[in-house]
Image (cartoon, grey):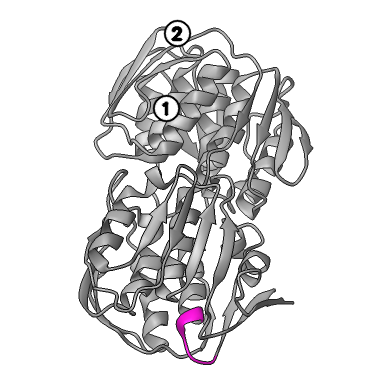
Amino acid sequence: MPKFLIEGNAKLSGEIEVKGAKNAALKIIPATLLSKEKININNLPDIEDVNRSLELLKDLGGFLKHSKNSCEIQAEKITKNELNPEIANKLRASIMFVGPLLARLGEVKFPHPGGCVIGAGTRPIDLFLEGYGAMGAEIKWKDGFYHIKAKRLKGCAYFFTTVSVTGTESLMMTAVLASGTTILKNCAMEPEIGALADFLNGCGAKIKGAGTPTIMIEGVKELKGGTFNIIPDRIEAGTFAIMAAATRSKLKITKCNPGHLEILLSMFKKQGIGFSSGEDWLEIKPAKVIKSYSIKTHEYPGFPTDLQSPYTVLMTQAAGSSLIHETIYDRRLLFTDMLTQMGADIIMCDPHRVVVNGPTKLAGRKLTSPDLRAGIAIIIAAFVAEGKTEVDNIYQIDRGYENIDTRLSSLGAKIKRIE
């Protein structure tokens, strides 16, 4: 298994380009199942999760022409309605194939979606199942598989009792080919949802309100082909901004959308972290003193759970105490034990809250990446630390960050991938 060797006391400089959004790509790919015509996707991130998603699409019978950052897909002949468990068990986003397959074929069989320690077998899909049922589907569980059937999906009114990004996206895709009108309420409002709606509408869907709490979908008989550019990855952009702040580096982040990071940038102002920005770029400036600031993760436009791990590392370098309150994923704070091993002063109050006291000096250690976002946070901590850090299980990091070692090395970081 490959690992990263990292030397600490890193000072980064130069420019780094943001890639296409992982959380948009993993919804656009299964959405292509809703059309029989050719669909071209550009600005596709070259990451493991995207490769697994394309692998799953191909296994279902989809035709692919895939280059590094683009793909031509045609799902004219879908030969299977069952998700391959060997692939689905590696990918939480496999659940996103269920709605399109159900809408297209009227039947789908799949295992509980997998992924990393954050996603594998622990995150419920009850909202998905309730939504499919509200549209007239029959749902059964047998021998480790869900089996869902619907002769004809019908539009419905569905209220999300818990705000869910993937739930919103899945039911929106499912409703596109249903008869009648579907109204989804208490929807998530992430930019990736609006991007998915833009893609579907470009192919002939009739979706209104995406990016607001209420989405209305008028069912259509079929979707056409089209071309779509994946939006910039706001989590990657935010991660690089936090990385620059934690290492007190001057760094310009390009091909991003600063408007998607308003919560983080408003906090930077209060913390004394300087920055300037334009329409598609953001430059972080070194801060002499970083002030501590508490956060509580929340759905967009609140503080993203996917930036919580990197932000926790930043708080180890801030003056004062900060409370990190994770409200979305139960296991996401467990990685702070690794920061404690590196010398961080962190008190775990309960599984959802930790207090970080800073600033503290960190020291390099041998560590294992438990999940995608904790993995990139460990890299940031290693850059801040004294000495060398060894990071194992970097497949988890490769799941969401394209060629991260090469890109960071170009900024002056001393990071090597070894087999």
Inspect the image, locate mark 2, and give the three-letter code of the amino acid beneath it.
Ser
Category of crowding for the residue at label 1, using alpha-carbon neighbours closer than 10 angstroms: few (below 14), some (14–19), many (at least 20): many
Q: Quadrant of residue 175?
A: top left
Q: Are marks 1 and 2 in contact (CB under 8 Å)?
A: no
At mark 1, the secondary structure is helix
Left-right relation of 391 to 362? right
Inspect the image, locate mark 1, and give the three-letter code of the amino acid beneath it.
Leu
Which residues are drawn in magenta?
Answer: 383-387
Q: Which mark is residue 179?
A: 2
Secondary structure character of the magenta stretch overall: loop
Q: Quadrant of the C terminus?
A: bottom right
Q: Is residue 177 magenta?
A: no
User: Does residue 412 show up?
Assistant: yes
Residue identifier under label 1: 171
Q: Residue at x 29, y 78 (%)?
A: 289
Q: Position of residue 80 (x, y in %)?
A: 69, 29
- Distance between the alpha carbons at the discs numbered 1 and 2: 14 Å
User: Does residue 116 show up?
Assistant: no
From the viewer's perspective, is residue 361 above or below residue 301? below
Pick the front one: 344 or 242? 242
Q: Residue at x 40, y 72 (%)?
A: 286
